[in-house]
Amino acid sequence: MKRLWFAVLTLLTLAACGDTETKSSQYIFGTVVEITVRGVPKAEAEAAFAELAEGFRRMHADWHAWKPGGELMRVNAACGTGEPVRVSAFTLPLIADAKRYRTLSDGLFDAAIGRIVGAWGFHADEPEKGRAPPFEAIRALAAQHPSMDDVSIDGDTVTCANPAVSLDFGGFAKGAAVDWALATLRARGIADAVVSAGGNVGTSGRHGDRPWRIGIRDPKTWGVIAAVAAEGGESVYTSGNYERFREHEGVRYAHIIDPRTGWPVEHILSTTVIARDGSLADAASTALTVAGVEDWPRVAARMGVDQVLMLDDAGNLYASPKMAARLAFPEGPKPRVIVRDIP
């Protein structure tokens, strides 16, 4: 199963509808990207989709942490030796963002742990199941404390001070890609659009006379646990910790890694963040999952996000006040939502 992650865009049509709504499906970073535009002729929409496809192809090649030949692979090779490496203007902003998100999250989101992610097997499209993970190798890597603080940027040159550093943009690159896609559509004069990359949904404009409606996946039933009406420019991002995993001797090791320990996060199934910066929302949803039930309000405040919904493995829902106020639930018994203030 491909990584079709944890949000549902509930009101997309399945085909083009005259010149009112046109849809395209593309593939990047192991995820199907759904793009819907409204109010433009089909030919104009298809020209925009072609431009997006070309940009996505370059992202997939250069921002991929383990596909040979890309720029990030070249950067990671230099990190392993400590040699300075020049980085293009296409990739350098993501390295700068990765450093910023590490600082904002108090180290709970750290894109420097690519070797640890790879050791767990989560660089593969299909993580291994059955065989024991290489626990000792993982502990040894974690003991070297790879961090974006070990990465310095001087102009267009990047240097890594720790050979254990290996950059992996998987925790926020889809957010950056969705942000870029929406900006590209707006530059073409396409005001009303939605781009969905698995659990990452970015919006622009409106769905006709109403906002875009975004459903948040219920991992227990694969239905929708709640929905929100997203005003144009808002992004709804969910990090889910229940579908992508490896299993050994009855233990599931989920793919979201705590950078402090090198070990998978337990007890949190998903975290959703709404913000206007999709890349930040993407990183924050992961960082808050690592922070867990007790610490997420503090980390949300540090990262500047105030709309959060968290689901733990006991079925408890936790929400910030602003998120709780806008949740719409399906018919039937309403779940209890524990509201936690963000300091």
Image (tube, grey):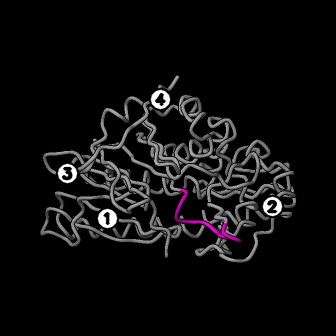
> What kind of element bears circle 2?
helix
Q: Is residue 232 magenta?
A: no
Q: CA distance from mark 3 to mark 1?
A: 18 Å
Q: Give the magenta part as a residue range.
A: 241-250
Q: CA distance from mark 1 to mark 2?
A: 43 Å
Give neighbour class at mark 4: few <14, some 14-19, many 20+ (Cα, 10 Å). some
Q: Which amino acid is tagged 4? A: Arg
Q: Magenta region, mostly helix, strand or loop? A: loop
Q: Residue at 18% across / 60% down in the picture?
A: 40
Numbered label attached to residue 48: 1
> What kind of element bears circle 3?
loop
Q: CA distance from mark 1 to mark 4?
A: 42 Å
Residue 8 point in image, percent of width and height? 34, 59
> What kind of element bears circle 4?
loop
Numbered label attached to residue 138: 2
| Nearer mark to the viewer, of 3 and 4 | 4
Q: Which amino acid is tagged 1? A: Ala
Question: According to the image, label 4 marks what residue?
Answer: 340
Quarter-of-image position of residue 309: top left
